[in-house]
Image (cartoon, rainbow, N blue to C red):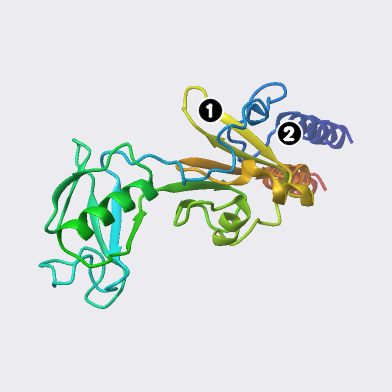
Amino acid sequence: MRIYTHLTNVYLIVGIFILSSCSFKQQQLLFKEQGSIQDTSKINLSNAGNGTSDYHIKSQDILQIRNLQNIKYIVDETPTTIASGGPGTGQGQTYQVDDDGSVALPVLGRIHVAGLTRAEAAKQIEDLYRKNLLKDPIIDLKITNLKVTMLGEVRVQGNFPLVKDKTNLIEMLGQAGGLTEKANEKNIKIIRGDPKNPTITEVDLSKTQALADPRIILQDNDIIYIAQSKRAVKNDQLLNISNTISPILIVLNTALIIYTFIHR
């Protein structure tokens, strides 16, 4: 009888220890700070809603340029290389902005584009081609390396390109396959700006008003993080506790069975 009492005490001690050590464990919490997080985007809305339309071209950016008057190439003559797709794809060619802020274009040579917005660069290139080579060109220019990063409870995590000027959070979540069943849709963080002093936007997608919020228009290098809901965290905690306790209980039950057989 004494051994049963000892084993019972062991069960209780093990259970209390595991519960106390695991009850506060929370999985996949990134960008979590102590105390309440101030939504710094409410302080300054000067850049909200602009998306990438006011993004200024920098060195190492990748520009995709095509002449809409001739969907094959930027100029009417076949270039020696096609950087993105073969002839007839209509995707245009890609050109990297050099360290000096210039980009080398057919016929025109080097053109300084650093510091210009996408629309300003397209107009400058269009004017130069109209003056030097083409009749009524319509230049389409895209900056293909702009992106946002999706982390947390989305179907597909990773980097996603910003292919148009005003891509919003809803569209990007759609590209990522939507939220998982564990997601906390009431507190989605958009982190942008200087990594040393980022702007943090908190969006509650359980409210339809969020759809009209200009702060959900995404910008280059935004980080979108979706944490787990409290219910999902609690379920994970219970699962972790169960996975930890189960092997211990098996060992103790086995020991009890062996002891019972030996002392019959």
Instruction: Tally the numbered discs.
Output: 2
Residue depicted at 55% across the width and 58% down the height: 176
Please tell me whether residue 252 is drawn above or below residue 161 in the rendered image. above
The percent position of residue 229, horizontal first and vertical second, equals: 74, 45
Quick one: 232 or 207, which is closer to the camera? 207
The percent position of residue 112, horizontal first and vertical second, equals: 22, 41
Q: Which disc number belongs to residue 220?
A: none
The percent position of residue 225, horizontal first and vertical second, equals: 59, 42
The image quadrant of residue 136 is bottom left
The image quadrant of residue 101 is top left
Residue depicted at 51% across the width and 23% down the height: 197
Could you tell me if residue 61 is visible in this image? yes
**Residue hosting label 1:** 198
The percent position of residue 201, horizontal first and vertical second, equals: 63, 35
The image quadrant of residue 107 is bottom left
Q: Residues within 10 Å of mark 2 (few under 14, many from 20)?
A: some
Q: Residues within 10 Å of mark 1 (few under 14, many from 20)?
A: some
Give the alpha-carbon distance from disc 1 to disc 2, as whole Å.
38 Å
- Extreme bottom residue here? 88
Residue type beneath disc 2: Ile
- Apparent side of residue 70 relative to residue 252 in the rendered image (left or right): left
Secondary structure under tag 2 reads helix
Could you tell me if residue 239 is visible in this image? no
Mark 1 or mark 2: which is in front?
A: 1
Please tell me whether residue 191 is drawn above or below residue 84 in the rendered image. above
Quick one: 105 or 82, which is closer to the camera? 105
**Residue hosting label 2:** 18
- Apparent side of residue 203 relative to residue 142 in the rendered image (left or right): right
Residue type beneath disc 1: Pro
